[in-house]
Amino acid sequence: MSKSILLMSNNNNNNNNSSNEDELFELRRGPWTLEEDNLLIHYISTHGEGRWNALAKCAGLKRTGKSCRLRWLNYLKPDIKRGNLTPQEQLLILELHSKWGNRWSKIAQHLPGRTDNEIKNYWRTRVQKQARQLKVDSNSKKFVEAIKNLWVPRLLEKMEQCSSSSIEKKQNLSVLPNLPLTNNQEPSTKQNKSHDTNNNNVNNTTWASLENLRINSSDSMNVLTENFNSIHQDDECYHVGSFIQQPEHFTYQEMSISECEVAEANWFTDEGSLWNMDEFWQFKKLEDVNI
DNA sequence: AATCGACTCAACCGCCGGCAG
DNA sequence: GCTGCCGGCGGTTGAGTCGAT
């Protein structure tokens, strides 16, 4: 099924009688075969990666260097992680994308084993799909805020569910978590955060105060779980809090998701939306009021 | 069983910056 | 400074898959 193309050498000398094999070279395109994969793996295992054009020739692959590089980095490299993105990884992608935009390779550096291609595909197929369904531009502020206030809490909750399966459900989960301070924050600001459930000034909301935190691949998950707010549950609702960074201090914002909403929404399954339309429009209304 | 549309993701393309000659 | 090559990046495509009808 894979196709190939014939490329003419740039040296198009009609008087040259040397064999056409020297003038024409076949360059394969399309899906890689097992044999090609083996060639590439074997060559890299003995010679290392890099110098991709030379590598392609020396390995006997009728592929461009670019193609070899892509195949190796996105598929064959031993530490590539397979399978669905975990809630933690999704959360990290949302967070990092809010900071860096479509800098996929940069984002991928913070997700060990995940490739920029995979993250890019995730964004296009999952995140942008949500925006399309909501008829909102995925780059719009509205959508970004919707992600922060609807999607992220759900991922957080999923993470909590996964990590605390052995913990009693009703346990209060770090209502006011330790918030690592950045260099330019006064210790007292940590205590200034008020538990203001009515503060919906999302314009000031940051991604759970992560903006000033250094994140590296080894501790980014911890940073997220430590700083991304809090989740606790009373009889009726899940309360999802987040810290709001204002010029001088942090305040604390909390929104509630009713248990039935959580139960009803299949927000973490691949087949469903991550939030339902009602929630989005409620959120949108709330936002409009506060603008 | 056949068809169709939606979705996924591997692979390609074009552009850009760095670097050597 | 100019040119060509190469590697890296982000955007896009399209074959394959899956579920609904």
Image (cartoon, coloured by chain):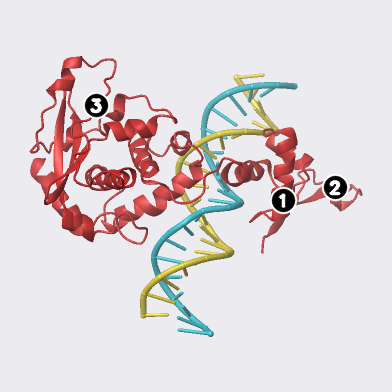
Chain colours: A red, B cyan, C yellow
Q: Position of residue A66 (x, y in %)?
A: 64, 42
Within 10 Å of disc 2 (Cα), the crowding (few <14, some 14-19, many 20+) is: few
Question: Image point 37% across, 36% down: which residue?
Answer: A96
Q: Residue furthest right?
A: A17
How far, Cα to Cα, is label 3 from label 1? 51 Å
Callout 2–callout 3 Cβ contact below 8 Å: no
* Marks 2 and 3, the one that precedes in the sequence: 2
Provide residue A36's location: percent of width, then percent of height: 72, 51
Under circle 2, the secondary element is helix
> Are the residues flagged by discs 1 and 2 in contact, CB closer than 8 Å?
no
> Which subunit holds the residue at mark 2?
A
Crowd band around label 3 with a 10 angstrom C-alpha radius: few (<14), some (14–19), many (20+): few
Name the residue carrying label 3: A178
Query: What secondary structure is found at the residue carrying circle 3?
Result: loop
Indicate left or right for B1 with A50 as reference.
Answer: left
Residue found 71% across the figure and 37% down from its top: A45
Q: Which chain's residue wears label 1?
A: A
The answer to whether B8 appears left or right of A25 in the picture is left
Q: CA distance from mark 2 to mark 3?
A: 68 Å
**Closer to viewer: mark 1 or mark 2:** 1
Q: Quick one: label 1 or label 2, which is nearer the N terminus?
A: 2
Residue with the mark numbered 2: A22
Q: Which mark is residue A116?
A: none
Q: Quadrant of the C terminus of chain A?
A: top left
**Residue position for label 1:** A36
Q: What is the distance, in whole Å, between disc 1 and disc 2 at their CAs? A: 22 Å
Mark 1 crowdedness (10 Å alpha carbons): few <14, some 14-19, many ≥20? some
- Secondary structure under tag 1 reads helix
For residue A97, what is the image quadrant?
Answer: top left
- The answer to whether residue A258 is above or below residue A178 is below
